[in-house]
């Protein structure tokens, strides 16, 4: 369970309901949580939820907006500052910094959720509910576009589609780590007992993201060879299906320098975690 640093002794009923919904959302996800659980955790009755929010959906909207609105305002402000200072010298590291630094700052603010904030961020961008996806895509599309455009300027060698896929995979991995319930145990195992704080953890993840984002474009022949290996490892019809699915990797260069494939041409779904992320076209700037 996420550890909340804010006090529950406050008499603010609305805040108690939001805090309870946040804790349960982090632990269970949208589909598994119920108003009964929320009212029990907040020590209020259903009439109080209806009075302040009207429905479970409206409550979850308010819960997410309470954290993500401020996060994305601070992200955009930092990205604007980097843009003004660096212009064409803006790097991939600066764009990632604009995504991560505000999140870390808020995770140290008890009034913004404290350490539980990162768990919320991870859950928001890994929750499988279409309701959560739709909310993030609808409310933070402009933030995601802004960060995607910044990544494009910092990584001009990548076609738009390729950049979308790389951001989708990289930020999705980060969101999964933030949302994971066993992260502390894994850290203890991998670090051999040495402590690692949130800043060190995200710095390590960000370094891997930078390497993945900056990597040269893949050779289609190498991708097809790997696809063949995967197909041979499958059995019977699974092998045929695997080879068929991987056929999209056999891409031909387009005149605009991109690569034809069956992957989506728009980055909206691929970079949604940018909103976070999170956190955050996300598609959260996970």
Image (cartoon, helix red, strand yellow):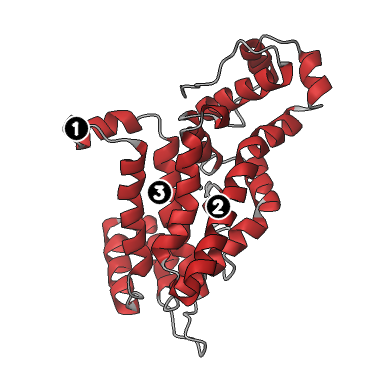
- Residue at image location 76% in from the left, 20% down from the top: 49
In primary-sequence order, the first of circles 1 and 3 is 3
Residue 242 seen: yes
Residue 177, located in which quarter of the rendered image? top left
Judging depth in this view, the residue of 89 and 242 nearest the camera is: 89
Q: Which residue is label 2 attached to?
A: 75
Judging depth in this view, the residue of 93 and 175 nearest the camera is: 93
Whether pointer 1 and pointer 2 mark residues with C-beta atoms closer than 8 Å, the reply is no
Please, what secondary structure does the residue beneath circle 1 have? loop
Q: Which residue is label 3 attached to?
A: 173
Give the CA separation, mark 3 to mark 2.
20 Å
Indicate left or right for 30 with 190 as reference.
Answer: right
Give the CA separation, mark 1 to mark 2.
31 Å
In primary-sequence order, the first of circles 3 and 2 is 2
Q: In this view, does 172 lie above or below 242?
A: above
Please, what secondary structure does the residue beneath circle 3 have? helix
User: Around disc 2, counting alpha carbons within 10 Å, would you say few (fewer than 14), some (14 to 19), or many (20 or more)?
Assistant: many
């Amino acid at each position: 369970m996420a550890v909340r640093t804010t006090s529950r002794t406050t008499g603010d009923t609305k805040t108690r309901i939001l805090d309870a919904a946040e804790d349960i959302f982090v632990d269970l996800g949208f589909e598994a949580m119920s108003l009964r659980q929320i009212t029990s955790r907040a020590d209020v009755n259903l009439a109080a939820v209806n009075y302040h929010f009207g429905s479970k959906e409206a409550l979850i909207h308010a819960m997410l907006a309470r954290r993500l609105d401020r996060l994305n305002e601070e992200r955009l402000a930092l990205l604007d500052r980097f843009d003004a200072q660096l212009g064409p010298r803006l790097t991939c590291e600066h764009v990632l910094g604009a995504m991560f630094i505000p999140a870390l700052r808020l995770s140290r603010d008890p009034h913004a959720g404290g350490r539980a904030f990162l768990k919320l961020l991870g859950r928001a961008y890994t929750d499988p509910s279409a309701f959560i996806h739709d909310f993030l895509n609808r409310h933070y599309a402009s933030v995601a576009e802004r960060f995607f455009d910044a990544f494009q300027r910092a990584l001009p060698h990548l076609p738009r589609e390729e950049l979308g896929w790389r951001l989708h995979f990289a930020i999705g991995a980060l969101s999964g780590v933030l949302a994971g319930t066993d992260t502390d145990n894994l850290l203890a195992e991998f670090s051999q007992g040495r402590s690692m704080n949130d800043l060190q953890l995200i710095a390590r993840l960000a370094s891997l993201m930078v390497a993945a984002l900056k990597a040269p474009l893949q050779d289609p022949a190498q991708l097809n060879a790997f696809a063949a290996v995967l197909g041979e490892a499958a059995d019977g019809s699974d092998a045929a299906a695997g080879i068929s699915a991987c056929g999209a990797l056999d891409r031909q260069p387009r005149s605009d320098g991109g690569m034809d494939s069956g992957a989506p041409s728009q980055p909206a779904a691929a970079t949604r975690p940018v909103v976070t992320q999170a956190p955050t076209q996300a598609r959260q700037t996970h």
